[in-house]
Image (cartoon, grey):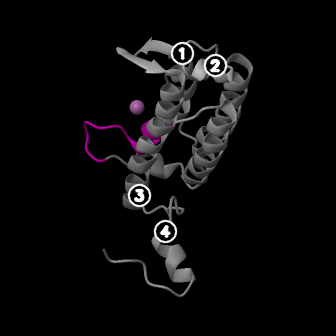
């Protein structure tokens, strides 16, 4: 768990960078991909990742600018990726400017739970990772090339002359 704000920022920048690579790989057509008629489309999951960042920060008691047009899923993959670029950078500024290291041990009542500031920031990252994992499955189904996340994607193993692990 983070004991200082910069530890969070480091992990955030790393995870947001990976999320950015995933979002940058989306195509407009792929946004319509869905696992079932009742579930979110790929575009909706991607947009949820973007809009939930200021949404969660606000729930944590921070002042964060909501995403303009958050209620409508864009039809442009580029718009989703570009908005994430802004929102993910803004998030680091919001946390740096409004919280101190002491905020990390303060307990807040958020989403029906009592959590420390550090636990909330960790939740922000876990939420993004959770939906990013959902995205990569739908991207495969949509025929979009998926970038490696914690290790090489299948094509990246192959381009190194290696076979991807089978188990
Ligand atoms: Ni969510």
**Helix, strand or loop at disc 1?**
loop
User: What count of labels does the image hold?
Assistant: 4
The image shows residue 63, relative to residue 128, as above or below, that is: above
Q: Please identify the quarter of the rendering in which residue 94 is found.
A: top right
**Label 2 vs label 4, nearer the camera:** 2
**Quadrant of the drawing holding the C terminus:** bottom left
Counting from the top left corner in percent of width and height, residue 146 is at 50, 62
Give the residue pinned by disc 1.
Answer: 106
Pointer 2 and pointer 1: residues touching (CB < 8 Å)?
yes
The magenta stretch spans residue 70: no
Which residue occupies 46% across, 46% down? 132
Q: Which mark is residue 153?
A: 4
Pointer 3 and pointer 2: residues touching (CB < 8 Å)?
no
Left or right placement of residue 57 versus residue 39 in this view:
right
Mark 2 or mark 4: which comes first in sequence? 2
> Dot 2, crowdedness within 10 Å: few (<14), some or many (≥20)?
few
Left or right placement of residue 123 versus residue 57 in this view:
left
**Helix, strand or loop at disc 3?**
loop
- Closer to the camera, 11 or 162? 11
**Label 3 vs label 2, nearer the camera:** 2
In 3D space, how far apart are the residues under numbered discs 2 and 1 (Cα atoms)? Answer: 7 Å
Counting from the top left corner in percent of width and height, residue 20 is at 61, 48
The image shows residue 113, relative to residue 32, as above or below, that is: above
Q: Please identify the quarter of the rendering in which residue 159 is found.
A: bottom right
The image shows residue 44, relative to residue 68, as above or below, that is: below
Looking at the rendering, the stretch of residues picked out in magenta corresponds to: 35-46
In 3D space, how far apart are the residues under numbered discs 3 and 1 (Cα atoms)? Answer: 43 Å
Q: Is residue 83 visible?
A: no
> Dot 3, crowdedness within 10 Å: few (<14), some or many (≥20)?
some
């Amino acid at each position: 768990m983070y004991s200082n704000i910069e530890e969070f920022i480091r992990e955030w920048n790393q995870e947001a960078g990976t999320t950015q690579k995933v979002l940058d790989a989306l195509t407009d057509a792929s946004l319509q991909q869905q696992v079932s008629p009742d579930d979110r489309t790929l575009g909706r999951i991607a947009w949820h990742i973007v809009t939930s960042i200021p949404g969660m920060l606000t729930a944590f008691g921070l002042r964060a600018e909501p995403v303009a047009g958050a209620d409508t899923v864009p039809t442009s993959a580029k718009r989703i990726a570009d908005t994430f670029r802004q929102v993910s950078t803004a998030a680091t500024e919001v946390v740096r400017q409004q919280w101190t290291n002491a905020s990390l041990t303060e307990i807040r009542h958020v989403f029906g739970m009592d959590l420390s500031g550090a636990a909330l920031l960790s939740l922000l990252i876990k939420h993004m990772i959770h939906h990013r994992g959902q995205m990569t499955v739908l991207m495969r189904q949509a025929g979009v090339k998926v970038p490696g996340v914690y290790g090489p994607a299948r094509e990246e193993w192959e381009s190194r002359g290696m076979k991807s692990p089978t188990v």
